Image (cartoon, rainbow, N blue to C red):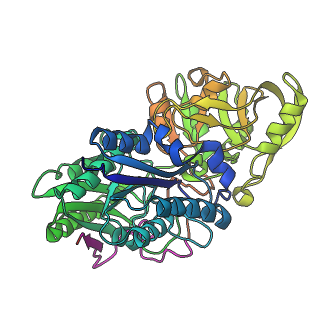
Amino acid sequence: MKPLPRIAIGSIFTESNQLGGVPTELEDFERCELRQGPEVLEVETGVVGGMLRMLRENQAQPVPLLCASAYPGGPLSSGCYARLRTELLDRLRRALPVEGVLLPLHGSAVAEGTEDIEGDLIQAVRQIVGPAVPIVATLDLHAHVTPAMVQGADALIAWETYPHRDAFDTGVRGARMLLDILSGRCRPAMAMAKVPVITGAIHGSTEGNDPFAQLMRWTKAHEGRDRVVSTSLFMVHPPLDQPGLGSGGLVITDGDLDRAVFLARQIAEKYWARRFELEPRVFTPEEAIAQGLQVEGAPVVLVEASDCCGGGAAGDSVATLKALLAAGIEEPALVPVVDPEAAGICHRAGADREVEVELGHRLDPRWGKPVRVKGRVIGLSEGRFRYRGGIWDGVEGDMGRSAVLGLGAIRVLVATHATYDWLDEQFRSVHLDPAAAKFIVAKNPMNYRQAYGSIAKAIFVLDTPGPTPATLRHVRYQHLKRPYFPLDPDIPGLEPTILQRVRS
């Protein structure tokens, strides 16, 4: 009997912010997901779950290496990345020989001393397995696709949805691509074309009629035609500060590089043509609150996108909280803040006790000053909740010791650890009902739609200081050089940057 093909699976998955946030350490992976060896085979959801399902259904033997994922944050410390990288690669060396490698990655991860984690990993894996063994990597559609990624992998396949709902399906597609390469059904020719469009995610939905959604539908419509086997559309993660940052399209054909380059270029040119539509209208917190008070009914959502934990921010901004306090609102409002020191003070005081605390801007103080408040501890929690869908569907989230602090009509959820916002799991876990609030502060540029879109009477996108701003007009990058949009509305003679590779 012919032995089953052995397919290695290994992942270091997170999204990094080079404009702010706090460093990502090994304990951040341990708190979220860190599986080693056979533990990886227990995964049933997400990209890894999809890959495992596809391999098992096609009589391939998964060879588990490492599955490490963490909430977005600042760059990984050099020690953290070295530990994870060494373990993944050592396990791969011990597992040889393998017929293929699957790498479920993000595409926007950075470590101290390593600007391109995914490119570094793909190249290191290639050195170990050699040129003949196919490598397929999956990426978030917010990836920064680099030359090292394209040159090292046989195929790169991105998620198709934002909010992210297709992690499992992307794992299936990635594994199917690898199996098709092994069977000879596909000899991938890959081309990535990008243009210097650096925008936030406010209009980056793949649902409805957002400009990105329309571009995604056009991009995906070419799959299955003219030997095109996969298309991907990328809205780059803007809190990275790296040369060559840009958005665009990646196309994989069965052996036809010219066709891949032509279509990828078309996608990038269409992306450039829609650039102005991707910029949001923004309000100061004071403007939004004043207009929100005139809105009949509730809730009114205040989108403080600049402090998005899902984009690597610390979650410790109190810019909107200060404006709510200054407005003297008397209707209920919900505000999330990450502040381990304040959470500890509340826990030591106990429930239903009065406390006075300095709140906010202590993890990443570059963006503002704390606000001193007196309030009552409404409730206490150990901060655990379970995600209902998305990237970490079914995974237990961990805010650490948390408290609900009452400041008049305002309820502040004070957490110890930053966590990704999918729906309203964090508020619900501490018995706060968003539907009962006049104002909800949401710190995610996209997922507020699915959490509150059906109940919101009005939504205002805020322009506040922070490392994940709704618009990049105010950001001055150190390593990304001009010209780029939105600082440069027009770039005469612009040609997309083309990256390409054909499997031998």
Label tally:
0
Part of the protein shown in magenta: 477-503
Task: Judge by depth and name the residue closer to the eye, 199 or 229.
Answer: 229
Q: Nearer the viewer, residue 213 or 292?
A: 213
Residue at 34% from the left image edge and 58% from the top image edge: 100
Vertical comparison of 273 with 410: above or below: below
Give residue 371's position: percent from left, percent from top. 80, 45
Instruction: Decide if residue 402 is on the left or right side of residue 475.
Output: right
Examine the structure image and report whether residue 278 is included in the region drawn in magenta. no
Q: Is residue 498 a member of the stretch shown in magenta?
A: yes
Q: Main secondary structure of the magenta part?
A: loop
Q: Is residue 161 visible?
A: no
Q: Is residue 137 shown left or right of residue 472?
A: left
- The furthest residue to the front: 1
x and y percent of residue 248 in the render? 32, 62
Judge from the rendering whether residue 293 lies leftward or rightward of residue 451; answer left or right: right
Between residue 432 and residue 140, name the one nearer to us. Answer: 140
Judged left or right of residue 249, residue 387 is right
Residue 326 image offset from top left, x and y in percent: 74, 39
Residue 24 in view (yes/no): yes
Say which quadrant the C terminus sits in: bottom left
Q: Residue 293 in the image: x percent, y percent?
A: 59, 30
Residue 47 against residue 413 in the figure, above or below? below
Q: Find residue 437 and report its image quarter.
A: top right
